Amino acid sequence: MIQFPSTPTGPAAADPDVEAGLRAQQSGDVEGAVAAFRRVLARNPRNAQAHLLIGSLALEHRQVQAALEHLRRAVALEDRNPAAHANLGHALMAGGEHDAALESFRRAVKRAPGHPQALTDLAGCYCALGRMERAAETLRKALKAAPDYVPALHDLALVERARGRHAPALGSGLITSNRRWRRGRRRRRS
């Protein structure tokens, strides 16, 4: 899953083009969002947030080379940002560079220890590399951090099934279904 930064911080937060780009992106106007973020880069080519947002949008629209270019730049400019590393990992996976993606996902987890999405992304890369035991272990870490994190529950069920462990897979699948059902039920009551 691709992580879009929710709200920019620091100098990017005050930039009206970043705000306009985020509004355009949220309303589905991809061209308008990219145009706004490019205006930011025209003024400041070192704006990591704009590179991250353009790269994420490019990846979402399967423009892998453009995504790699912008996400690598975002990581180079703001190495401590786990979303930049995670999105770079997704772009590397899409480009078939699984070993490089693994390192990028590991860096995302290092910068956001215990973050369930970062751990689930890392586990997905382990799966792509055929390292199912390591994927299951990583997904369990995600669930330790966030027991109700449905993507990790779902992925753990799939990994256990692929490992031939049908009972744990069934258990994870039932837990996932039950949690989704309870969530839907609470929403209908509100």
Image: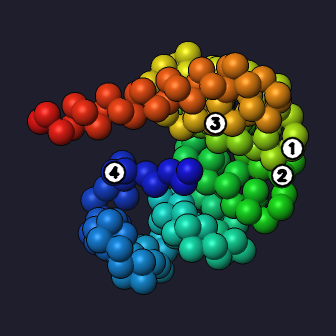
Quadrant showing the C terminus: top left
Helix, strand or loop at disc 4? loop
Residue 15 visible in the shown view: yes
Foreground residue, 46 or 84? 84
* Image disc number at residue 98: 2
Total of numbered circles in the picture? 4
Q: Residues within 10 Å of mark 1 (few under 14, many from 20)?
A: few
Closer to viewer: mark 2 or mark 4: 2
User: Considering only vertical position in the picture, is 168 above or below 86?
Assistant: above
Give the residue type at disc 1: Leu
Q: Which residue is mark 4?
A: 7
Closer to viewer: mark 4 or mark 3: 3
Give the residue type at disc 3: Asp
Foreground residue, 74 or 155? 155
Helix, strand or loop at disc 1? loop
Helix, strand or loop at disc 2? helix
